[in-house]
Image (cartoon, rainbow, N blue to C red):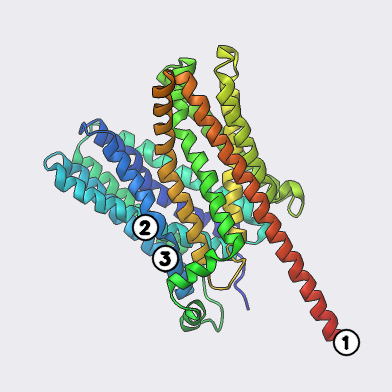
Amino acid sequence: MIRAPIGWGGIVRLGLIQASLGAIVVLATSTMNRIMKVELGLPAVVPGALVAFHYGIQILRPRLGYGSDVGGRSTPWIIGGIAVLAAGGVAASCAVWLMATNLMAGLALAVLGFAAIGIGVGAAGTSLLVLLAKRVVPERRPAAATIVWVMMLAGFAVTAGTASQLLDPYSPARLISITGGVALIALVVTILAIWGIEGRVSGETPAASIATATSEGGFLQALAGVWAEPQARRFAIFVFLSMFAYSAQELVLEPFAGDVFQLTPGGSAKITGLQHGGALVGMILVAVAGSLFAGKPFGSLRTWTVAGCAGSALGLIGLAFSGRFGPSFPLQSWVFALGVANGAFAVAAIGSMMGLAGKGRSAREGVRMGLWGAAQAVAFALGGFASTAASDLGRLILGSAAGAYPIVFTVQALLFVAAALLAVRVFQDHASRRDAGMRMAAIAGEAQGD
């Protein structure tokens, strides 16, 4: 007996959890980032290192995913993860207040706060995707991935916009109270959204789940077993390459628009808005195509994953050569198209995670999803730093920004090409194993008939 699939209402409820997660994260990575740099006058490397640290600590995602495998349930890990995330967000806001009077003590508390943020995101985010992977039928996965991702972005936008109004005039007490309020709301929304949605199969017991998950040893053995699966390993490398390239472009796009096309700060901000708008269009496009053309090539996650990576590579190559055309280059249209490709690839990759998480040894969905989540987090931690450092180094060696950006964009494009080729290999392996399984089932059926 299996659990009934989650319907559209359940998918939206799980999307509310992702929105709650995003609401707390954006306060730490955006609002507190700005306060540390502007109001406190700290070097940009301080908040930058804290943000990178919260990504880096998510290398623990496989271990957190293994915990949900052992218990056989995602709900405790989702609620517990949001609770840890909420505590980390409040601790980080208190650290900002403390930095004004005791910098070292404030930094120490900030490290603890951002560590809790990373662990909370890892626990809740991994288990949420595992639950979606187990309970969403294949034809709904593209739309489910879009809904969850867009609702996370909505959590970013609504919280950032509301906080910007409530924080004026700024005071440490305001920051702490706003962060505490957002954290409390996020936790309550999460509990209400997840309550009763997972359920339990008749006859299923925690002891049985634990016995299944631990029958071959502990976490390290489980991780080694998942890494030994060619498909899981290749997909982890695909996630790292593609997300590295995806995150690397974001921090250099606005400086590129200003240095090469002499756009004002408002004009370069508009460029970023166009990219994000295009990404939203790409996400919706994948959701619609996946629903209308389910079972056909145009609606498959494989098609959109590979096409999104290839389109992103093409968009970056265009930007690399755009400086040669000067003002006549259609920068706005090109960036919007790049955003469409980015959004399509990102949502298709998440949907592919849902489909591939259960392919392999049973009771290892959490470890697989954790492995891929860790690859994504590490890629985000390194991507932004690497791209900005490369642009600075290229400017230093070549003597001009115009010569540095093409190199950076070209390298990012090559990473997307490598990711696309690897994705093709992953899906070919999946198709080969599926066909082999069907042949074995047919042979077994014939044997029983004889």
Disc 2: CA contacts within 10 A as few (<14), some (14-19) or many (>=20): many
Residue under circle 2? 120
| Quadrant location of the C terminus in the rendered image | bottom right
Element at badge 2? helix
Q: Residue at x 46, y 74 (%)?
A: 70
Res. 380 in view? yes
Contact (CB < 8 A) between labels 1 and 2? no
Which residue reaches farthest right? 450
Which image quarter: residue 7? bottom right
Observer-side mark, 1 or 2, equals: 1
Q: Nearer the viewer, residue 181 or 89?
A: 89
Q: Earlier in the sequence, mark 1 or mark 2?
A: 2
Q: Nearer the viewer, residue 450 or 324?
A: 324
- Report how far apart the C-alphas of labels 1 and 2 lie in the structure: 55 Å
Where 418 sits versus 375, above or below? above
- Report how far apart the C-alphas of labels 3 and 1 lie in the structure: 47 Å
Q: Earlier in the sequence, mark 3 or mark 1?
A: 3
Rendered location of residue 349, percent (x, y):
59, 50
Tag 1: amino acid: Asp
Residue under circle 3? 63
Q: Earlier in the sequence, mark 2 or mark 3?
A: 3
Rendered location of residue 73, percent (x, y):
47, 71
Rendered location of residue 21, percent (x, y):
41, 52
Residue under circle 1? 450
Tag 3: amino acid: Arg
Residue 74 relative to residue 353: left or right: left
Tag 2: amino acid: Gly
